[in-house]
Image (spheres, helix red, strand yellow):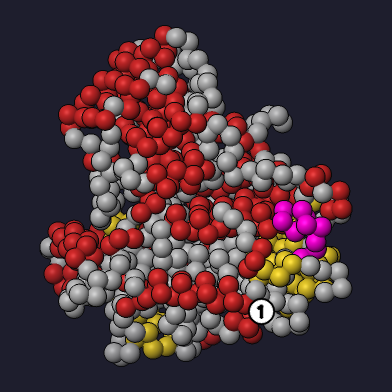
Amino acid sequence: MRLKAEEATPMSEDETLAAFDRVQPIVASDAEIEAAVGDADLPALLATLALLTQDPALLAEELKPPSPSMTARIAPQGGMSPQAQAKARALATRTLIGYRDAGCPAAAAPPPEWLDRIVQFLIRSGHDDLLDLLRHEINVPDDQGAPGWHVSDFPHAADLKVAVIGSGFAGITAAHRLKQAGLDFTVFEKNDEIGGVWWENTYPGCRLDTPNFAYSLSFAQKQDWTQQFSQQPEILRYLLDVARRSGIRSHVRLNTEVEQLEFDATRSAWKVTARAADGTAHVEHFNFVITAMGLLNRPHVPDFPGIDSFQGEIVHSAAWHERVTVEGKRVALIGTGASAFQIGPEIHSQVSQLHVFQRNPPWMLPTPNYHDDLKPGMQWLLNHVPYYGRWVRFWQFWIGVEGRLHLVEVDPDWKHEVSISAGNEALRQECLATLQQQFADRPELLEHVTPHYPPGAKRMLRDNGTWPEMLKAKQVGLVTQEISHLTQDAIHTKDGKSYPVDLIICATGFKAADFLYPLKVTGRSGQDLHACWDGDCRAYLGISVPGFPNLFMTSGPNTGVVVNGSAIFSSECQVEYTLRAIRHVLSQGLKAVDCREEPLVRYNAYIDKGNESKAWAVAKTSSWYKNKSGRAAQTWPFGMLEYWSLTSTFKPEDHVLW
């Protein structure tokens, strides 16, 4: 679905990002309120009501969620006992009725110590070191990630210009923060609309596999999500709304792809060459460049022998278009990763034959509500209780701070042919039990869909039963033999079999190891960035590279969070760090900042050591987590606090400034 800006949520000219938080007054009956609370995410609701009323009874120790560590499943209601849940529902219902009867008064700005007390109620004891990070995510009462400075503070910087490449989540974040700082900026977007991968990916079944409250921007917290794992149109509509409400659309040049960056040492600025849709090239100079091109945005189509001879249609999942039809066709789905997991169940009932080509089976996380709408009571609370959406987002974020990171840590004393620790084995057994139940009637399939590598070694997928149901359908066949070549109407495998097909869907991933591909970047001394990397991309904090001054990356090397946190959090850290760096340059009356080599080497040694102790490093399975040399160049191996701490301060001593 290709939404346009005019199809986003209608709004008046004076609406801002604050509009995402607006709710309707409560006029429901006592019984209706009680019914809604029955569908509530209780820890978040207690925190919300504590913010609204500042009643300490809502934060009683007996109601505190224990928040057990995540395994394959997340403990409902934070692991609260049935007795605690019953008490929490009764108290929340009484509080909401009283709030209604008082006329739904606006919440007063909470004292900092009260806000911290609410946060500490939700998190496990002993994590006070996370408070600054968590204040940023709840974002009450003020925007914690705002730059805190304005370009007007530095008169000599009046003509300074910043280029942002890309307008997905990270590009919108960069544009918003630059606008807050009053900087002159331009966003270059190669597509004909804002949204990045959420504009590009329109394949059947496209949706989030991360809970969507946590997969949203801290400064634009939306209350009225309709599902826990939203579909592509809802995510895109959200991004279009954020862009419009933040006032950045006028700064975006659509249908314009940046092809080359060349650092001009005489001007201490970047020469940016961009090409418009009509083929016209434009050249401008910018003092700083922020790349927001994403990690999984350049499709990878395997170069199968004979691919040019195939007479049917070949489409990559990320290049789906409205002319693609599957009805009544013989279809090949190549790949069993995240996009295949969404496409296959969506199309299998429409095709005459579906051949699913699998290289490595994925581990699946049981997620029964993956396709479900939020419960009616939950939706009512989000639409009527101020700040409830913020605390739901915060609660999901807190659960993901640690995530499953502890389950992918290698225990050198653990001896097992598959798993890498006792916790990893427990996760494996939990997932394996679900597989065995789902394929109990098809033991020959169970053998082929059971992974023989540790959970977490590659991306784990959401499972609500639709994938097993699809594989067992009579018109669907699972092919585990390697593809040898294509002919004009068939795919052939190395065991000599052939599979006649009309349409090939390549759910074969992206050029994840080729950061900034295909952008040509020439640095301070004429060096080519891709030649410097030579397929093994490294960066300081995942943000900057020595010899390439005033160039800041989002979603750079080793910033991909794969078992904890979210890419949104990481990109906000990267953008806020960039604004700190720019401020330092301006405050010193300088023009440029360039990372030094020694901090880069030190930082990457730290990253490599962390990655070497994770499941993806020791597993003998293919994954986009690793580059062609086998090094994990994509993954962040530590917790969210570590990355927050590293990016929360700009260190002049790690840089050359002039």
Where residue 125 sits, quadrant-wise, is: top left
Asked whether the viewer can see residue 124, the reply is yes
Say whether residue 586 is magenta: yes
Camera-nearest residue between 335 and 323: 335
Q: Is residue 494 left or right of residue 450?
A: right
The C terminus appears in which quarter of the rendering?
bottom right
User: In the picture provided, is 455 more to the left or to the right than 294?
Assistant: left
Residue in the picture at 34% in, 35% down: 121
Give the quarter of the image for residue 31. Answer: top left
For the point 18% across and 62% down, which residue is it?
A: 426
* In this rendering, position of residue 138 left or right of residue 19: left
Number of residues whose C-alpha sits closer than 10 Å to that of mark 1, classed few (under 14), some (14–19) or many (20 or more): many
Give the residue number, with chain letter if any, for mark 1: 529
Q: Position of residue 116 (x, y in %)?
A: 43, 34
Q: Give whichever of 602, 377 is nearer the camera.
A: 602
Q: Which residues are magenta?
A: 583-592
Visible residue check, residue 167: no
Residue at image location 50% in from the left, 15% down from the top: 105
Relative height, residue 523 to residue 474 (above, below): below
Q: How many marks?
A: 1
Question: Residue at coordinates 50% horizontally, 54% vertically from top-left?
Answer: 644
Q: Amino acid at mark 1?
A: Leu
Which x, y percent locates residue 457? Answer: 33, 71
Residue 558 x %, y %:
49, 69
Above or below, 307 against 434 in this view is: below
> Is residue 75 shown left or right of residue 647?
left
